Image (cartoon, rainbow, N blue to C red):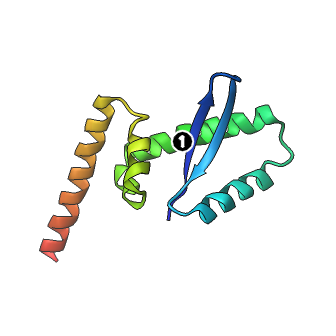
Amino acid sequence: MGVCLVQVNFTIIKMKRYRFSSGDEETSRRAEQQFLRITENMTDEQRDAVLDCLIKMQKQLFFQEPWLMKKFSGKEQAHILAQYTKEEQMIMLARFDLELQHWKDKKRNS
């Protein structure tokens, strides 16, 4: 099961929070604990900068390899896709279709 970082903005108190999302609450909790252990010597600002960087990297990864999203629930997939423009979503769908066709062709030729 994959773990997805999701940025949540609270505009009322102008504070950023992040949650570690997965299909399993225990996996999410362990991922967050591990991240906090790794970053325990960082300031809140440094930790936020690392999380911002991780979210950008994750967004780029899902854009380049959208088939990785199939390990997430439909609700989580929708949340991930909501981060992208309609044009980016269409590109991701085309990539996914090409990858699927590649594996179908490879399986047929085996």
Quarter of the image for the C terminus: give it: bottom left
Asked if residue 90 lies left or right of residue 109, the reply is right
**Residue occupying the far front of the picture:** 12
Q: Position of residue 43 (x, y in %)?
A: 84, 36
Asked if residue 105 lies left or right of residue 56, the reply is left
Q: Taking 18 as reference, is 66 above or below it? A: below
Asked if residue 32 lies left or right of residue 109, the reply is right
Determine which quarter of the picture holds residue 29.
bottom right
Q: Amino acid at mark 1?
A: Met
> Observer-nearest residue: 19 or 4?
19
* Residue matched to label 1: 57
Q: Position of residue 8 (x, y in %)?
A: 59, 35
Q: Position of residue 74 (x, y in %)?
A: 37, 53
Q: Position of residue 25 (x, y in %)?
A: 59, 61
Q: Residues within 10 Å of mark 1 (few under 14, many from 20)?
A: few
Secondary structure beneath label 1: helix
At 61% from the left and 58% from the top, the residue drawn is 28
Q: Taking 107 as reference, is 38 above or below it? A: above
> Observer-nearest residue: 9 or 60?
9
At 44% from the left and 50% from the top, the residue drawn is 76
Asked if residue 67 lies left or right of residue 26, the reply is left
At 70% from the left and 34% from the top, the residue drawn is 49
